[in-house]
Amino acid sequence: MRSPWTAMWALCACFFMIMLDSTIVTVAIPTMLTDLHANLNEVVWVNSVYLLANTVPLLITGRLGDRFGPKNVLVAGLVAFTAASVWSGLATTPGELIAARTVQGLGAALMTPQTLSFVTRLFPPEKRGLPISLWGAVAGVATLAGPVLGGLLVEHVGWQGIFLINVPIGVVSLVIAVVALPNWQPRRELRFDLVGTALCAAGLLGLVFGVQNGQHYHWGPVFGPVTIVHILVVGLVLLAAFVYRQVTVRSREPLVPNELFRDPTFTYANLAHAAMGFAMTGMFLPLVLYLQTVLGQTPLEASVLALPMAVTAAAASGVSGAVWHRIGARNLIIAGFATLAAAVGVLVYQAETDTDPTTLIPGLAIAGIGIGFVFSPLTTAATSGMPPELSGAASGVYNTSRQIGGVLGSAAVGLVLQLGIAFAVPDAARQYAERLPPRYREEFVRRVTEAANTPSQFDSSRPPVPSDLDPDVADLVRRIVTEVFHSGFTVAAKASLMLPIAVLVLGIVAATGIRGRARIESRACSSSSPPSPPPA
């Protein structure tokens, strides 16, 4: 049998591309707007449609691995992802790029559950710590490295480079996957519940679309009389119908086997994973906007500040993978959540309108340590007791929980940030208006308030200054408006960062339900079998 580590590198490369493409597009938005003659909504959908296509099918694609073999599904996803990357890099219109990103997201959804499924099959429970820590490190480093690498590629190659960089990685990964991955096949033929599958897909599509795009549509009409609220309600009803069918229908194989949640560790690990997805996505949005809007960092400069976090996350993930057997998965996970919450709290305390960006580096580095302490032991705890025939389903559920948490985190923190701006900027305007001549104060506060309540007008580089003002007064107004927006935005960003802290506390509560080291190991050794040899 070939060394499982040969296959592990191919799996890591696949997972790296998937996670990288979830964050690399952000810094390219201004360039795409110009080169593709696109509007902001079209470019935002370039990223949103990838996350949507990558999230919604995960439960289904996890089970496809159990049905057709994880190697076959992973290779199909890798081919689709790599081909779609070429298509994305060659796209000349916004619509073409959005279509290509949809295919790319579907390819990622095919691959993601199989990567973790293979890790649990390639390595027996007692040797799973290091590969799981590597898998977790790849997730953290790729997510954090996306904006940095994206900034470098956009600056020196063009926005097309953020997609075309996947092509050589994908081709090499495809060769290694075909040669090195064992072709496990299911021991019995699975007969899927097609009605349940359709309910799951439609329900998740409604939920994720509604949460992800609620702010864009102002929680109102999307088309005709159909509103975001209607879509969310329909999505939740369909998911409730899916759960009921999963419990009651016995003639077909359920999409989410009930056996998964008979293990309380798996249940609590998924809740904790959702909390981590929420916190990681939620903390980056206000931090990046604060660095660029208030502290004047370029996208690349702001991204480089995240490098210490990526380094410490990778290092902490390796350490946690090596020591969790002695310390206990639950203890490390709780420590990681607490460390990340404390680090975000420090960043909230430090954030002011005149903060030196470099003073934020220690807090970001400590946040990376917290992230690294969570991913490896959490993944090990969630998967160590799963029998091989359920590994695809378990991986699909586990990855879906992170993605759903991330979508909710982005939407919730964005909403809090928007509400914070609507309150904090007018409040700052009333205070700063005292520096203006009395006859200008009321109009100044009114114009700033209107801009703060209209996100598309919220731009401190183009302050709402009447054209008929005296030049000296106009200059004073411009300076004050910039200070008002910076002050108000800082207050709003600090307030929105409290939400990830609160969810991290809930993550600690969920982590207390994870079984201790001895119980996890004993269950893993009794229910998991060593990997089967590859077919001759």
Image (spheres, rainbow, N blue to C red):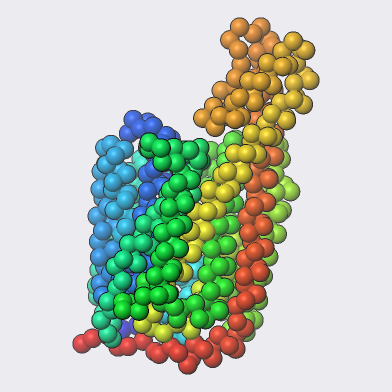
Residue at the far bottom in the pictured view: 526
Quadrant housing the N terminus: bottom left
Residue 142, image x and y in percent? Answer: 46, 59
Q: Is residue 364 above or below residue 465?
A: below
The reply to whether residue 5 is in sight is: no
Task: Tell me the quarter of the picture where residue 288 sits.
Answer: top right
**Which of the 4 quarters of the picture holds residue 58?**
bottom left
65 is higher (above) or lower (below) than 56: below
Residue drawn 35% across the image and 32% down it: 38
- The correct choice, above or below, for 91 with respect to 232 in the image is above
- Residue 217 in the image: state x and y as whole percent: 46, 38
Q: Closest to the observer: 63 or 17?
A: 63
Residue at image position (42%, 79%) is 120
Q: Give the mark count.
A: 0
Q: Residue 446 appears at what percent x and percent y?
A: 66, 20
Outermost residue, left direction? 536
Whole-percent x and y of residue 169?
A: 32, 60
Horizontal placement of 396 versus 168: left or right? Answer: right
> Can the viewer see residue 409?
yes
Please indicate whether residue 359 sits to the left or right of residue 180 in the image. right
Q: In the image shown, does 128 or 306 lie closer to the viewer?
A: 128
Is 388 in front, or is 478?
388
Vertical comparison of 103 with 420: above or below: below
Q: Where is residue 352, by image quadrant?
A: top right
Q: Is residue 5 left or right of residue 306?
A: left
Residue, x 38% and y 83% (percent of image)? 388
Is 187 on the left or on the right of 269, as rendered?
left
- The residue located at (27%, 76%) in the rendering is 191
Location of the C terminus (image quadrant): bottom left
